[in-house]
Amino acid sequence: MKQGRGPLYRLYIGRLRRSLTPETVPHHVAMMIDGNRRWARQLGFDSAAHGHRAGAAKMREFLRWCDDIGVKVVSLYLLSNDNLRKRDSQELSDLVEIIAELAE
């Protein structure tokens, strides 16, 4: 777990882990990374890449958590048709770079 998490988050994670048994751990889960542009804009960042990188960091945390509890298959949705149609070339370039870093 990342440092700096509040006590309520830690309680929530502990409770969630205790509620999972080998029989209730899902075999497959999926994560759709969304809302990172809005998050970056709300925090006053000049580039959506800040939000995309924060989403990538959260995805890494999610994958570690899945590994820790024994989820066997994880599907990740990182780039939508909307991204491809509506985002400028710089933002798409940033997204592809971040996705490539994640793949490593």
Image: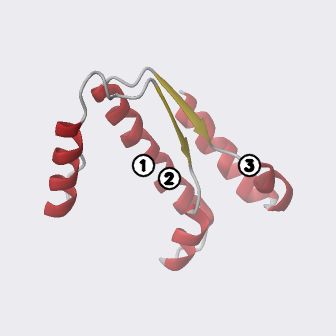
Q: Residue 58 has which mark?
A: 1
Residue 54 on image: x %, y %: 47, 55
Amino acid type, residue under disc 1 in the picture: Lys
| Whether residue 6 can be seen here | no
Q: Are marks 1 and 3 in contact (CB under 8 Å)?
A: no
Q: Earlier in the sequence, mark 3 or mark 2?
A: 2
Q: Residues within 10 Å of mark 2 (few under 14, many from 20)?
A: many
- Disc 1 and disc 2 in contact, CB within 8 angstroms: yes
**What residue is shown at x 53% (from left), y 35% (from top)?**
102
The residue to which callout 2 is attached is 55
Mark 3 or mark 2, which is nearer to you? 3
Q: Which mark is residue 100?
A: none
Disc 3 to disc 2, how far (Cα)?
14 Å
Residue shown at 33%/23% (left/top)?
70
Marks 1/2: CA–CA distance: 5 Å
| Relative height, residue 17 to residue 10 (above, below) | above
Q: Badge 3 is on which residue? A: 80
Q: Give the x, y percent position of residue 57.
A: 43, 47
The residues bearing labels 1 and 3 have C-alpha atoms spaced at a distance of 18 Å
Vertical arrangement, residue 3 with respect to residue 64, above or below: below
Using the rendered view, name the quadrant where residue 7 is placed.
bottom left
Q: Which amino acid, mark 3? A: Ser
Q: Position of residue 45 (x, y in %)?
A: 53, 73
Q: What amino acid is labelled 2 in the image?
A: Gly
